[in-house]
Image (cartoon, coloured by chain):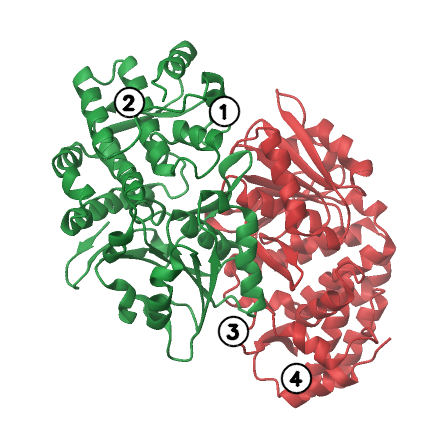
Chain colours: A red, B green
Amino acid sequence: MTASSASPYQRLHVELDARRYPIHVGPGLLDTPDMLVPYLAGRQVMIVTNETVAPLYLERLKRTLSGDDRDVREVILPDGEHTKTLASVERIWDALLAAGFNRRCTLVALGGGVIGDMAGYAAACYQRGVAFVQVPTTLLSQVDSSVGGKTGVNHPRGKNMIGAFWQPRAVLIDTDTLATLPGRELAAGLAEVIKYGLIQDAGFLAWLEARMSSLRGLDVEALTDAILRSCAIKAEIVARDETEQGQRALLNLGHTFGHAIEAHQGYGNWLHGEAVGAGMLMAATLSQRLGWLSSEDMARVETLVASAGLPVTVPAAMSADDFLAAMRLDKKNIDGRLRLVLLSGLGEACVYDDTPPDMLKALLDEFPRA
Amino acid sequence: MTASSASPYQRLHVELDARRYPIHVGPGLLDTPDMLVPYLAGRQVMIVTNETVAPLYLERLKRTLSGDDRDVREVILPDGEHTKTLASVERIWDALLAAGFNRRCTLVALGGGVIGDMAGYAAACYQRGVAFVQVPTTLLSQVDSSVGGKTGVNHPRGKNMIGAFWQPRAVLIDTDTLATLPGRELAAGLAEVIKYGLIQDAGFLAWLEARMSSLRGLDVEALTDAILRSCAIKAEIVARDETEQGQRALLNLGHTFGHAIEAHQGYGNWLHGEAVGAGMLMAATLSQRLGWLSSEDMARVETLVASAGLPVTVPAAMSADDFLAAMRLDKKNIDGRLRLVLLSGLGEACVYDDTPPDMLKALLDEFPRA
């Protein structure tokens, strides 16, 4: 990761050799052709967005991308995690083929994580791979799904089960888009921001404790700093382990529990970030029971998650067995052995496959319900 | 490409750095655990095959792969190019998820090119990528689709439009399987064998002219030599250009015309190799009209294609416009410009994007129909 302030925008790079790409962060990017056009592969451009985001930003982005004989089109999908299916990706492929687009075309994802994951997967597999640019418009997608090249869709039996690693040519984060973000979506994004502090950076965690009310109040400077620090941590981890052979798994703190909640509740009823928020508390509690976190540490985690407006309980309808059934399908597991990301301290995480089954069962039985 | 004769089997390697993999060629490989088991990623194994091949080889392969607590399962799909769809790949994903298979599982493709392409694509995208082994049972898949990592499915609007580059861990070519191959499928495979001579190796072309009757008579020694030479040529080209930025496109000699025939006739009514056979004649004829092949060269190409039992005419129902409409969607085209693989001589090919439109139209109008 390298940082620069030579341009009016903040910038960092995800270092992946031939697939190295920049992340630009700042106001007004959506209206700045110089920040977008250089990343297009050819004159064919397909913007992928959804029914919520399109009325807000689609025409502006089209205007910015047009000119020079470019053929700019769009696919507008329904909104929500429940639409993150292969059928939606097929609509993107159908649109590309109906337009006669070739392998020099570029897909531009305009929206949150669901749009980015689907557009990225569509780009990864259209004619065996075409160019892809991310324009994430939610805090969660800005700090999480737009960095690292994970793309894909859900399957009725599990989240993100079908997908590919496919890196964007660039990520453009226009901080103006956060002004229209609903509070619940903001909190969901903050869950991932908190995660970066918990797994890797105790200093950032303390900064978040001090700035949480500014962040929730949409203070642009605080949000820009939080986005840059989050992307920098993720970019550094991804550069070291692109295809999740080792350290990248730490980014899944709270996700094994969280995915179980999402799957049980039906995708989209809990936001991904909300489920991760509760899931991080479960992981922290287990870490405390293993003797790795003090009760003071645990109290700080609980307070921070609550102050972000995230759930601190799990659904009353979910039994321990519901959790275990979903957790057994987690992609981190190896040959049937459950692997969890836990906290070895505040700002330090590890992958652990030796949790005593009784301790896990007790946690799942006893964790507060609502 | 490196060759070795230290084992009872012939072997060469496709050189792709970290994704380097071996191709083993010889009799009895299907029954030899030592040639297969080392390439499995873990204890979960899913064999993907079809209703034609399963009765012939599935039980033998399962026996060979079993043992050591391995969980060996199968998906049996219908046979034929018309089944090469995303819906078939979804059946593979459903089976993997129903079995609870994780990212340490291995997909083994047992069958021809359609099975290999679909199993490879399923492996590329299951949990963002799992291990994959090819056991090709047709001449065409042995010399073509099992080398190079192209995987994918057809779309109603075009062949192989959805897919990924995904390399196998190994390719096991059991030459015994050719004994059960129908004559029409053998001829289809010979089309690709002839292609390697035409694009890269005039000496191999002369060898094929001398050995065509042995090859059609299923002479195992001649077939083994033809397979090894074909795989070696393809492996060398793929190693230099894995994702088809340049030279790899030469492997598409005859394919732009051929794909148009396949799409027009409905996938599977013409075999892929048959369409490539006629397509190579069209490409050669255009090369002759451009002044690059002599009439003697052209006569040799025609005689060789006919002696392999391949079609030398195109469907009567196809107009020049039918060809052009399909050819416009070819993946080689850049920003709307038609690019064709042509012969600059016998044993020498090039990608050409400057064919005079009138000359192409005349060829398409005048080429013999049947």
Marks 4/2: CA–CA distance: 72 Å
Q: Are marks 4 and 3 in contact (CB under 8 Å)?
A: no
The residues bearing labels 1 and 2 have C-alpha atoms spaced at a distance of: 20 Å
Q: Nearer the viewer, residue B293 or B77?
A: B77
Q: Is residue B24 visible?
A: no
* Residue at image location 54% in from the left, 78% down from the top: A337
Q: Amino acid at mark 2?
A: Ala
Q: Secondary structure at mark 4?
A: loop
| Nearest to viewer (mark 3 / mark 1) | 1
Vertical placement of residue B213 versus A79, above or below: above
Q: Which residue is mark 1?
A: B328
Chain containing mark 2: B
Amino acid carrying label 3: it is Ile
Residue B129 in percent (x, y) is at 50, 58
Q: Which mark is residue A334?
A: 3
Between circles 4 and 3, the one closer to the viewer is 3
Please identify, in this view, whether the residue under mark 4 or under mark 1 is nearer the observer: 1
SS assignment at label 1: loop
Specify the subunit that label 4 lies on.
A
- In the rendered image of this protein, does residue B13 appear above or below residue B301? below
The relative height of residue A147 versus residue A102 in the rendered view (above or below) is below
Number of other residues with Cα within 10 Å of mark 3, as a class: few under 14, some 14 to 19, many 20 or more? some
Q: Residue at x 78, y 76 (%)?
A: A318
Q: Name the mark on residue A292.
A: 4
Q: Look at the numbered discs 3 and 1 and tell me whether their residues touch, using CB distance below 8 Å.
A: no
Horizontal and vertical percent for residue B267?
Answer: 47, 37
Secondary structure state at the residue bearing disc 3: loop
Distance between the Cα atoms at labels 4 and 3? 24 Å
2 vs 3, front mark: 2
